Image (cartoon, rainbow, N blue to C red):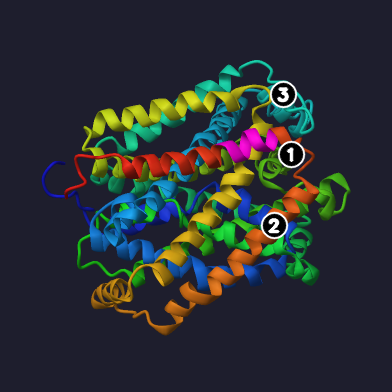
Amino acid sequence: MAGARERWASRPAFIMAAVGSAIGLGNVWRFPGTAFNYGGGAFFIPYFIALLTAGIPLMIVEYGIGSRYQGSAAKSYAALGRRYEWIGWWAVLVGLVISIYYCVILAWSWVYLGQSFFALFGEALPWTAKGAGDYFTQDVLQRTGTPAEPWEFGAMQWWIVLGLFLTWGAVYLSIVKGVLRVGKIVMITVPLPLILLVLLAIRGLTLDGASDGLAYYLAPDWSKLLEARTWLAAYSQVFFSLSVGWGILIAYASYMSKKTDVVNNAYITSFANCGFSFLAGFAVFSTVGFLGVAQGMPVGDIEATSFDLAFMTYPTAVENFPGGHFLQCLVALGFFLMLLTLGVDSAFSIVEAVATAMYDKFRMQREKLVLLLCLGGFLLGLIYCLGSGIWWLDITDKFLGDYGLSVVALVQCVLVAWVIPRSKLRELMDNINGRSELKIGTFWVICLKVFTPLVLGAAIVKATIDLFTEGYEGYPLPALILGGFVPVTAIVILAFWLQNMKGKGDAD
């Protein structure tokens, strides 16, 4: 790689890789659960506003600077101005920390996939006897402590460790040979979960009570639009789901041909992601509606948040599916295989963004670099494999998934729209328009200069005030500091340190 920069084998390979990065676990359990908690159908209003005014404009920025400057997030921001390199490092380091606990969630999916497979040869799914909730917390996690007492760390859960090893192994094998291999892998791993989700949605819509679940999913609660948390949730969902603010899209775009259309690719990626999210909502809430009928309880009383939805609610519904044991096992296999294929695509894209940044800076051998990143991610992820791991995972996800990505995106907005010289902004726009069928102009500039900074900035400030005054899920302040503020602070310090280090690639 010391010579010419690698290239995607084709435009479809790039688009599939970008879509594979954007579509992940967040579409299946984060989007439906977030919509459920923040106003149902009313949530779609801030979500689409966030998509059109922040998600797509910032995706165009990331595609544009990645392809224009042919480098990682750190290298591309350094090209805008040497003192801005830390912003790129901040983005990829936030993504790296997220990948550490994200892969633990995939490890849980490995456990369920294996159990669902072995259940084919048994009499019942393993969670049938004691219930999916107790099975998840007592058997899989062997959860210790409470949100108020997350210090009871408990024992290491070795089946989760095995799943974590398999996940990082898949990440390593996917990216160790560069983007040409990635392009081949995503041709399989992107269509497969879509096919599985369509089958699950069809199955869900045929169940009794499906209409009740969909009605609850789509019914608007307009009062939620007055809460800052709803708007922050909408923006963070867009950034989390589209991979904006992670440095991934900049890295992927740096392997584009310099003539590749930027704007069309941004719209294709964004709307493919949104379509998958809405389809996931139908698949999930039709099943939730069925579960309400099966258990004789209102849909609103069923847990439909992230972890609950994937590892408690959906497995409970599966064991009640009509059609017999064999069909129930097949549905369970399909669901957890879908989670894994979705998640691994996103996980290796995050690590690829970090690997690209490290290579561009230090010119390390790719195989050794990827091995070190994957091994380090695996070892750091072990903390989340303890009995109290889910509490610390939840805290870190709150700070990095909500605040980390949103603040990175806000800083990117301010930098591009207000800080860099106008000539640089005009040069970037001209470069993007010169190769794109759809053109960007006044609306794009207004979104970056005015709308997104004001709305996103206000939402971050208000949500932060609420966090300090109301707390979060009963966690003690020391736990929030250790699990949330410490990683964020470490990321910022490390980002400035990396910027100030002299690298072999700085002269490029």
User: For the stretch drawn in magenta, what is the main secondary structure?
Assistant: helix
Which residue ends up furthest to the right in the rendered image?
A: 296
Q: Amino acid at mark 2?
A: Ala
Cβ–Cβ under 8 Å for marks 1 and 3: no
- Please give left or right for residue 133 compared with residue 60 in the image: right
Instruction: Determine which residue is flagged by label 3.
Output: 151
- Report x, y in % for residue 103: 51, 35
The reply to whether residue 219 is visible in this rendering is no
User: Does residue 508 show up magenta in the picture?
Assistant: no
Which of the numbered marks, if any, corresponds to residue 316? 1
- Report x, y in % for residue 48: 58, 71
Which of the numbered marks, if any, corresponds to residue 463? 2
Q: Residue at x 79, y 26 (%)?
A: 130
Q: Residue at x 62, y 35 (%)?
A: 483
Q: Nearer the viewer, residue 233 or 449?
A: 449
Of badges 1 and 3, the one in the foreground is 3
